[in-house]
Amino acid sequence: MSSDNKIEASISGAAPAPKAADKILNVARDLFYREGIRAIGVDEIVRRAGVTKPSLYRSFPSKDELAASYLRKYDLEFWERFDEAVDAHPGNPRAQIIAFLTRVGKRTQKPDYRGCGMTNAAVEYPEHGHPARVVSETNKVELRRRLREMAAAMGASDSDTLGDGLLLLIEGAYISGQLFGLGGPAAAVARNADLLIEASLKK
């Protein structure tokens, strides 16, 4: 945006127009999540974003890098949601996990729910080393680490098994939410997690 346009936008109170890269990434995020990364071509993205193909490749050297950028943005949003649940219940890992999963369960009941973008990308890209899969794997490895750490903080005698059990519940909710939709088992993921925690702490 030119300096004159910036001044005009400031005077009028209008927000600056989004950059081409931001437009592309926002459109790609919506399409990749709803339709799948492999199902969406570059031509569809530039058409929806209202930009040219050269402008896409100036910002993202390849579709693979665009997919990885989408997932890096998804990763940031995921941890923001996770940390909100943690911050709402300081010093209480059990309540933190239940709060996070309560929100997951609610999201699974929405008509447009398509599960976890990270999980979906890992399924789409089985080849290790693919940029999209690398981002997905990093997210899941960190989630597993955190869940095991939280299970240990709860005093579970076998914290690694409890942490992994919680991870399996989460991944199951992501998939079953797409299969069953409204009224499906994913709605009760928080309750099932609490039962698993209770049983683990009794051992």
Image (cartoon, rainbow, N blue to C red):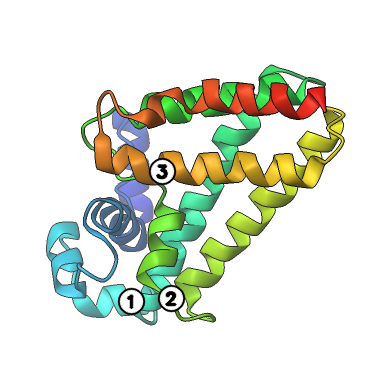
Work out whether mark 1 precedes mark 3 in sequence or the reverse, and give the earlier one.
1
Q: Residues within 10 Å of mark 1 (few under 14, many from 20)?
A: some
Circle 1 sits in a helix, a strand or a loop, which is it? Answer: helix
Q: Residue flagged by tag 3: what amino acid is it?
A: Tyr
Quadrant in which the N terminus appears: bottom left
Work out whether mark 3 precedes mark 2 in sequence or the reverse, and give the earlier one.
2
Q: Residue flagged by tag 1: what amino acid is it?
A: Lys
Residue sitting at x 52%, y 40%: 170
Dot 1 and dot 3 residues touching (CB under 8 Å): no
Quadrant in which the C terminus appears: top right
| Residue 63 numbered mark, or none | 1
Q: Position of residue 156 (x, y in %)?
A: 83, 32
Q: Position of residue 80 (x, y in %)?
A: 58, 37
**Whether residue 68 is situated above or below residue 3 in the rendered picture:** below
Circle 2 sits in a helix, a strand or a loop, which is it? Answer: loop
Q: Position of residue 21 (x, y in %)?
A: 35, 63
Q: Residues within 10 Å of mark 3 (few under 14, many from 20)?
A: many
| Residue 30 numbered mark, or none | none
The residue that mark 2 highlights is 126
Residue sitting at x 50%, y 22%: 102
Q: Residues within 10 Å of mark 2 (few under 14, many from 20)?
A: few
Work out whether mark 2 precedes mark 1 in sequence or the reverse, and give the earlier one.
1
Q: Position of residue 11 (x, y in %)?
A: 34, 31
Residue nearer the viewer, 58 or 95:
95
The residue that mark 3 highlights is 174
Q: Residue flagged by tag 2: what amino acid is it?
A: Pro
Q: CA distance from mark 2 to mark 1?
A: 17 Å
